[in-house]
Image: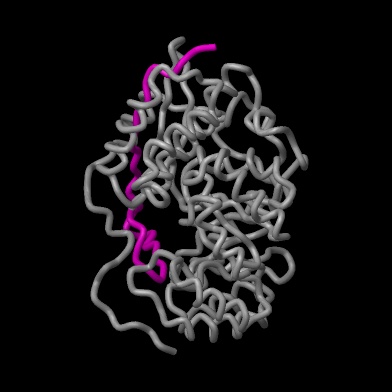
Amino acid sequence: MSKIDNIEIIFLEYSFPKSKNYQYSGGVVENMIVGVIKIIDTEGEYGLGEVTHAQFTHKPIIGLVEHFKSLLIGHDINNINQAWEKMYGSSLFWNREGIGIGVMGGINIAMYDLLGKKLKLPIYKLLGGLTREKIKIYASNGLFSSSDELIKDAHKAYNLGFRVYKMRVISPDTVIDLVKDFKKEFSEKMELIVDAVQGSTANPWATKVSINLAKKLKDYKILFFEEPCRVENIRGYQQIKNSTSINIAGAESIPTARAFKPYIDLDVFDILQFDIATSGFTEGRRIADLAYINNKPIAIHSWGSAISIMAGIHFSLTVPNATFTEYCFMDHPINKFLFENKELLVKDGYVEKPETHGLGVKITDEIIKKFPYKEKINTMISTNESDIQLI
């Protein structure tokens, strides 16, 4: 089998029109930025992965890709688990969590994509085969301050086959009215997830705010309440979960099974989420297995492009405790160029097993030229001085 000849990072960017005005509790989303890992083998074929952290930072990813590339040039593309252990073992002193694991995850996904293309097999077969023929997938956006915008976007998702929609909280003072209007519009036709987005907010609410909000959300039968406090606030998670009967979900920025274990031990999640383009398939399986033996369902997080969306689909089809995978539903044109078939078919809330070689994604010089990245400090997470909300 061939060997790794090169690993590179390609940044794609699409700037949203000002009219989109995408907002959430921690800031605004002005750009769709995709960090694409491309691995090329000695026979000139390539595989693609994605790094979720590219939404937030630029130069550190370039340096980390170069670091791991120096370890993996000449590595047999078959030995994906060995490549993971080589990357992790060489960086253990400084890389137990965070962006280094995220870059490893992108490389891991790209290695699987390359091997799938070489063997002409879908990724789920390389991961051990199916546990189900289809998986529930939800449309993830809801970055709106008005009911009209929220409902319009949700109708668009419904018409494309989605039956679950995720909205973000902009303010705890306004979210209940938005949820009420959504439920009135869709009744039993479409279910709702509410994401507080406090996990990585620079200036999060007091824990009591989320406790009070969870009590109010109980009346609306949401599927789950996501990241109601900062990720490192494990006691806050415990207090929130113990105060409500609604499902509490988290936490997308936790990258490894070891890092999830204290949260599992304290039973702070009803639904465990991890980001597929941070943990990759190798570590993702360990997280899913940890959740499984503790009787916890998982929901795959994928706030990225077609690459991570397809990775989430392939992975979730192979594990018995996967309940949902995510489709980033922000309105941008990048995905139709990255999907091999230009779009993803969703029917009655499900996506069926892909009949693809590898993930089912591609990249061309046309795509790179069409969505050039302009180096900048990404201001998506606001660090502006503000008062902490207490009630």
Residue 359: quarter of image? top right
Q: Nearer the viewer, residue 163 or 62?
A: 62
Q: Which residues are magenta?
A: 1-30
Q: Nearer the viewer, residue 252 or 13?
A: 252
- The answer to whether residue 337 shows anywhere in this view is no
- Which residue shows up at 58% across the image and 80% down it? 214
- Which residue shows up at 25% across the image and 42% down it? 59
Q: Is residue 160 magenta?
A: no
Residue 8: quarter of image? top left
The answer to whether 76 appears left or right of 16 in the picture is right
Residue 246 lies, with reference to residue 322, above or below; the image says: below
Query: How far across and down, in percent of the image, does residue 137 sit?
Result: 65, 51
Query: How far across and down, in percent of the image, does residue 333 sit?
Result: 44, 41
Query: How far across and down, in percent of the image, does residue 115 sit?
Result: 56, 22
Query: How far across and down, in percent of the image, does residue 298 sit?
Result: 65, 55
Residue 264: quarter of image? bottom right
The answer to whether 160 appears left or right of 336 in the picture is right
Q: Is residue 17 magenta?
A: yes
Residue at the extreme right of the image, as rendered: 132
Tell me the quadrant of the picture where the C terminus can be found: bottom left
- The answer to whether residue 192 shows anywhere in this view is yes
